[in-house]
Image: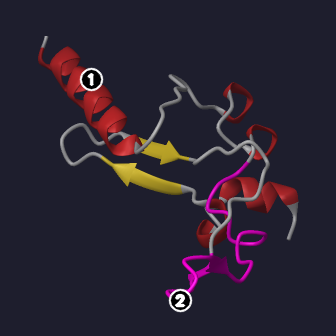
Amino acid sequence: MRQDILKRFLTNTDETGRFLMKSRITGIIYFVEPIYNGKTPKWGDLNPATGQIEGNYGSKFTGAVTKKESLITEENGFVNIGYCKGSPFGAIDQRDKAHQERLKR
């Protein structure tokens, strides 16, 4: 697939973890990309007998991208780029409520 097509559409969300959230209040669309440091997370099937994780599914389905692979850049037209630790939902909620307050003024 051509790179310009990849940058235009949200693809491989299972592998990249990218997703969109649209506020029903402000109409803003938030683009989310989980970022990881390039080390493949260890995950797979938990063996109840040993308590160990078996299988190596993390090499393909990381559910995140590295900063180098990120599409969220000013060059791609994004503004107000931010990072948060943990779940992005709280950060998005705070941003959207702040924007809603600015709209009321």
**Chief secondary structure of the magenta portion:** loop
- Residue extending farthest left: 104
Q: Pick the quarter of the image with the N terminus.
A: bottom right
Residue 56 falls left or right of residue 24: right
Q: Amino acid at mark 1?
A: His
Residue identified by numbered label 1: 99
Relative to 72, residue 98 above or below: above
Which residue bears the numbered disc 2?
A: 49
| Residue 76 belongs to magenta span | no
Towards the viewer: 70 or 79: 70
Q: Magenta segment range? A: 44-65
Q: How many marks?
A: 2
Q: CA distance from mark 2 to mark 1?
A: 51 Å
Q: How is the image coloured?
A: secondary structure
Could you tell me the amino acid type at mark 2? Ala
Identify the mark nearer the N-term, 2 or 1.
Answer: 2
Give the side of residue 47 with respect to residue 59, left or right.
left
Residue 85 in the image: state x and y as whole percent: 48, 34
Q: Residue at horizontal 27%, vertical 28%?
A: 94
Asked whether disc 2 touches disc 1, contact meaning CB atoms under 8 Å apart, the reply is: no
